[in-house]
Amino acid sequence: MTTSRRPAFTLVEVVVAAAILGILLTGMASAVMLALRAVPDGKRGASATLVAGRAVEMLAADLFYATAVSTATATELVISVPDRNGDGMPETVRYRWSGTQGDPLTRQFNGGTAAAVATNVQEFGLTYQKRKVQLPTSNGEGPEVLLASYDTANQLGHAVIDNNNLRAEYFAPTLPAEATSWRVSRIQFRGQTSGFLDGTLKVQLRPTIGGLPGAGVLEEVSIPESALSFTCQWKDVGFSNVSGLTPGTGVWLVFQGATSNNACEVCVETSATSPPNLSYRLSTNGGSSWSTLSGHQLRFYAYGKITSPSPVTYQYLLSQVSCTLRTGSDATCRLQTSIRVVNEPQVSGP
């Protein structure tokens, strides 16, 4: 019985096979290394640009429909966007980068956990383009101010007031150039009782007609003589209905008694130098005619309020945001883009 023997490899064959296998393994290892290097790692070239592009696309999707902006700096943006979860309330989205190279750009939704939308960030910056809009102007009334006065006491005299004997003082305030109207709020005059305390003083504001007190009365305040002092003292009289007066025009302050009984005595300066915006008149026939006494002026203070346009104000609307983002070490992979903000929310300015 014969037995067959399986042929074996010779030593030469084994050595040759091992050499060939070594060459194959070295080639395979090189191929694997090349393949690994070809896998995107988000740090170089097109891969880094792609990572940055996805992050900017997400930012643009949120920012495009932003309805409010609460924080807007170079490295942080907090905005409100319309309801996305069905609760009827706007959502809050926050983008932030620490400013430290290598740290991620994060996105936080409604105060939840901040998630990285781009890693290994080397550059991130936001700049804001704002639209300046002038707000409508309106007229506003300022605080009470002194409109006109005369209070020099060189040589004083007293003028008795009743229903026939009237005294009047014209005044026209000097107003700011931008004033649109003015009004009288109160008058102070110096007066005292005259004889029995049975009279009534009528303190009137009248328009000017032909340079003289008109017959019509803009507003009248009655003061019983008993409310005055026995010596010449300052008396304050309030007015509320004389408003909307045109700049450049004046009114007459008129003192008249209600009856023929003496209503009071008013203090008059008899050696005055009349300022250009003041004028003194007297009547002895109930206001039917008026005459002038040279050097005479009533001692008085007129207070009021001036209406002027409110200061011009502006609001600033966010119309566009420019974004710069670079991830990874390749300085040529910087992504720059502009994002339109369709709702133009209001932001601080300028």
Image (cartoon, grey):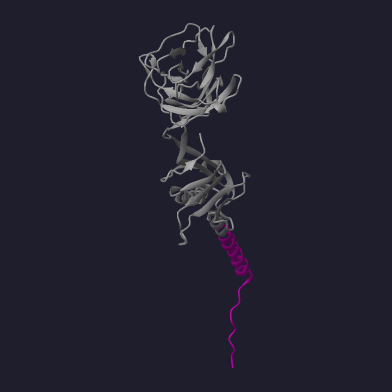
Q: Nearer the viewer, residue 286 or 339?
A: 286
Instruction: Pick whichever, 57 or 46, lies toward us.
Output: 57
Quick check: 84 above or below 207?
below
- Left or right: residue 315 versus residue 151 is left
Q: Which of the 4 image quarters holds residue 111?
A: bottom right
Q: Quadrant of the N terminus?
A: bottom right
Going by the image, does 102 lie left or right of 318?
A: right
Q: Position of residue 40 (x, y in %)?
A: 53, 54
Q: Residue at position x 51%, y 12% from top?
A: 297
User: Residue 235 location in percent, x, y?
Assistant: 56, 24
Q: Residue at x 41, y 10 (%)?
A: 291
- In the rendered structure, does residue 18 fall within the stretch colored magenta? yes
Count of numbered badges drawn on the protein: 0
Q: Going 57% across and 15% down the picture, which residue do you hit?
A: 151
Q: Quadrant of residue 218?
A: top left
Q: Position of residue 169 (x, y in %)?
A: 47, 16
Most distant residue in the front direction:
196
Please say whether residue 238 is visible from this viewpoint. no
> In the rendered image, is residue 297 in sight?
yes
Q: With respect to residue 137, does 165 lie above or below?
A: above
Q: Nearer the viewer, residue 57 or 334?
A: 57
Q: Residue furthest left?
A: 210
Query: In terms of depth relative to the viewer, which is nearer, 87 or 229?
Result: 229
Q: Quadrant of residue 204?
A: top left
> Magenta-highlighted stretch: main secondary structure?
helix
Q: Is residue 234 above or below residue 87?
A: above
**Part of the protein shown in magenta:** 1-30
